[in-house]
Amino acid sequence: MAFSASPTAEQIAQGIRQRVLAHVLANNGGYLSQACSSAELLASLYGNVLNLASTDGPLHPADFDAVPGPEAPRISGGIFHGEPGPDLDRLIISPAHYALVVYAALIEARRLDEAALDQFNKDGSTVEMIGAEHSPGFETTTGSLAQALSTAGGIALGRRLKGETGRTFVFMSDGEFQEGQTWEAIQALAFYGLDSVRVVVDVNRAQCDGPMDSVMNIEPLATKIKAFGASADSVDGHNIAALTHALERPTGRPHFVLAYTDPVRGVPLMNERRPVLHYLRFTGHDERAKYEEFYEALVSTESVSSSGGQA
Amino acid sequence: MSTRSNIEIVTRPHVDNFINWSADKPEVLVLSADLTNSCEVGKWRDTYPDRFFSMGMAEQNMLSFAAGLAREGFEPWLHTFAVFLYRRPLDQLQMSVAYPNLKVRLVGFLPGITTPGGVTHQAIDDVAVMRTIPNMTIVETGDATEVESVVDVAHAVDGPVYVRMLRGEVPRLFPADEPMQFNRARVLSLGGDALDAPAELVVLTSGILTEEALRAIPALRSAGVSVSHLHVSTLKPFTDPTIVTALRSATAGVITMENHLTTGGLGSAVAEVMAENSIATPLHRMGLRDTYAHGASQPYLLAEYHLDALSLVRVAENVLDRPLGVSASDLTKVRVAATHSNAKVEAL
């Protein structure tokens, strides 16, 4: 796909969905519904909201070297967010199983070499299926869910102690609000008035076992978050303008943008797989052929469309 | 021939020592989980209010929050009861702190049976759990000198450190000018004229049980036993050549004494070293043997679980296979440490 000088958030979102679908087809499976739900959310962050230093073009991911230890310094996937600075933003990614979507977003934002996806889930690669702190876009190791918000709180507090003014964004999934640690973190963020922490949540109401309302209810989420002392905006998670506005809106409190999303957005074929959408593994040749056909149509539509917006 | 102990008792050695030590280290922060005075950092909080962060009774968040602070270049020193550092938030400890090898200091109070707080407050498996965590360093304090010097040992480690900490009335067993040395045992007595000279018994002790052993060793020597006694403060890594040399010198047996389960702690570490170095000597591990403890005073629990000085004599007799004629009256007197000492802010 030919980019203009700087991709719009709309282009990033469309590119994420298309790229992840292509990858899932090529690999006979993957986390597709997460791309459908969070494409606009990550696109709003990378395209409109985050104040990050640029990278020296799309970077190629390093091979995996060693786990951190006394003899092995930590390698941070944060380098794909550019050199950190006191007035710059940070993005901490919590749901590590969104890694493929994050990599796709980084490629669309021209921070990651598109050949990186050839390394996805390959032995010896940092482009892991469940991202860890050496993986592109990841600063922390958060595959055990609900720890990133607390760590981001510590990062934000540390930055405040150093006089830094940049914001610390966190990308979360809604299932993490079933974990007690998330609520411990919110109460601490509110207690210390860490209004530099801004969280965007993919409220796709789908989790590993199926629809969230059959697994464990988390609603009313905004009411609960506000009761814990943070601010919360509920928005259409596919509306880039609304997402951007809510993410930028100063509230004087730790701020949560609850992006209500559709886990099959842009790939209505997946409706046939309800209620379990967490991971797409083709059941056979016929199903795969349907997705291939859909992808071909999507790409040809994209080639004659100038914007690629979904809504 | 009972000997009167002349051991100095230091009241709350951590309080002022940690304040003075922190003065020129602005990166040092303290995080606490509602046990601030109980962990002897109330005065620290009042001295450095901008560097103290109350995290409430929310340890999972505290561990991951500390990781974030460490990633920004700070050195968080978490003060709470040991059980609340490794049992409740173990996943956070492993994934947020240990995997990235962050300089987080975990200061765990109430190790083993030092508290009448009962099973919920007694960290009896902490060393075993922590020894399985890559990147983790484990040190244990056995007296006031070590409480004072463990801060330097921990500070120098490039990675997470777990400290088994003592509080309240703490004996000074070792000279104040002989600080804890990382990964180096203290040789407290020799069975021969050198560490590698044959000794019938080699006794390795850690934490509060070193004081118990010190009560029994003179009586053993008087009974004609050649015994070497080492105090171990670094439990991970466990690569001290001093220990290997001492273990090789044992002719009748090796005895370990720890305020912990016999599985996974000092005794297990010694067994591993003996096996890996082909040291074919009987090993007797003194500690809690596959049991939880309960709420009672330290002397009571030490006797109940056969961890006191007299128990060491009985084990020595067993290992040597001869009666030593030592009775309780032959042991160095126990210091009087009140269970409900005013040196503690609560009865725990």
Image (cartoon, helix red, strand yellow):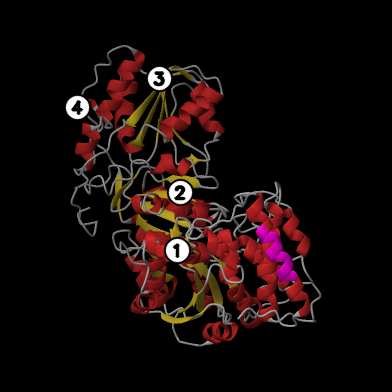
Q: Residue at x 50, y 41 (%)?
A: B236
Point out residue B212 in the picture as x, y percentages from the top left corner: 30, 34
Query: What chain does mark 4 sit on?
Result: B
CA distance for labels 1 and 2: 54 Å
Q: Of residues B33 and B285, which is closer to you in this image?
A: B33
Find residue B177 and name its label: 2
Q: Give the amino acid at mark 4.
A: Ser
Q: Which mark is residue B226?
A: 3
Q: Is residue A188 magenta?
A: no
Q: Is residue B147 left or right of residue A242?
A: left
**Sequence-first tag of 3 and 2:** 2
The amino acid type of the residue labelled 2 equals Asp
Callouts 3 and 2 close, C-beta under 8 Å: no
Whole-Å distance between the Cαs marked 4 and 3? 21 Å
Residue at screen point 60% across, 81% down: A311
Residue on which the image places disc 1: A175
Magenta residues (range): A290-299
In reply to whether residue A296 is colored magenta, the answer given is yes
* Element type where label 2 sits in the image: loop
Q: What's the residue type where badge 1 is placed?
A: Gly
Give the Cα distance between marks 1 and 3. Answer: 63 Å
Q: Nearer the viewer, mark 4 or mark 2?
A: 4
Q: CA distance from mark 1 to mark 4?
A: 64 Å
